[in-house]
Image (cartoon, grey):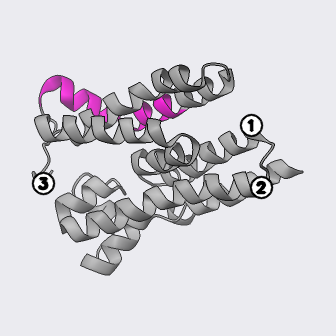
Amino acid sequence: MSYFWLIVPYLLGSVSFSYIAGRIFGGIDIRTVGSGNAGATNVYRNLGLKPFLFASFFDILKGLVAVILTKSLFPENEILIILSAVAVIIGHNWPIFFGFKGGKGIASTIGVVIGLHPLSALIVIVTMALIVYITRYVSLGSLISTLLLPILFYLFMGDKVYYIIFALVLTVMAWYRHRSNIKRLLNGTESKLGQKR
């Protein structure tokens, strides 16, 4: 019965703070401008820093809250905790409240990793920040930093194979959601940070 709980993190993930930021700060549906993605980067490109920080903070927070809530209610069920982390990201990517048209899950992924292993989250955040700073490609920073997750989970939690599998699932989801970005990176047409698409 405890697995019915996964509905809760999915619904939490389905609250699109990028969409909310678009409505609050710009009176727009963020899915209709720029890249059409309901994510913080698209918010930044079209509405600026303050709405971006709002969307990023709350998308990270919902990932963290999903893990913390599940840990507090089911502290002995590590599989359920991991599945709740996956569920909140699925909710973000394919939100039931917004026609299943969501973001790419990077901020929420950071949130769940903070809840599961803060040191790994710190390494991912620093890596992403450095790559974005050097290259100005947010997508490249997202792709490389998520690629680190299985490696980090292997190094820090290698005795728990399900955590490594979980990290691989997060990486696959992130790369799948970024497939159009990967194509643009390869052909040199990806927009850099600060450019409007």
Specify the amino acid type for callout 3. Lys
Membership of 172 in magenta stretch: yes
Membership of 102 in magenta stretch: no
Which percent across, then down, holds residue 182?
28, 29
Specify the amino acid type for callout 1. Ile
Depth check: give the residue in front, 70 or 40. Answer: 70
Q: Residue, x 34% and y 61% (percent of image)? A: 31
Query: Is residue 186 something one can see in this rendering?
Result: yes
Task: Give the class, few, some or many, for how many residues have Cα within 10 Å of label 2's Cα (few <14, many ≥20).
Answer: some
Local secondary structure at mark 3: loop
Local secondary structure at mark 1: helix
Q: Residue, x 25% and y 33% (percent of image)? A: 140
Q: On the picture, is 86 further left or further right than 184?
A: right
Residue 196 is marked as: 3
Q: Quadrant location of residue 162?
A: top right
Which residue is disc 2 drawn over?
Answer: 5
Q: On the picture, is 34 further left or further right than 56?
A: left
Which residue is disc 1 drawn over?
Answer: 79
Which percent across, then down, holds residue 29?
33, 70
Which percent across, then down, holds residue 178?
35, 36
Question: What segment is highlighted magenta in the picture?
Answer: 170-188
Specify the amino acid type for callout 2. Trp
Rendered position, 81 above or below 40: above
Which percent across, then down, holds residue 168?
53, 25
Local secondary structure at mark 2: helix
Residue 193 is marked as: none
Q: Quadrant location of residue 141?
A: top left
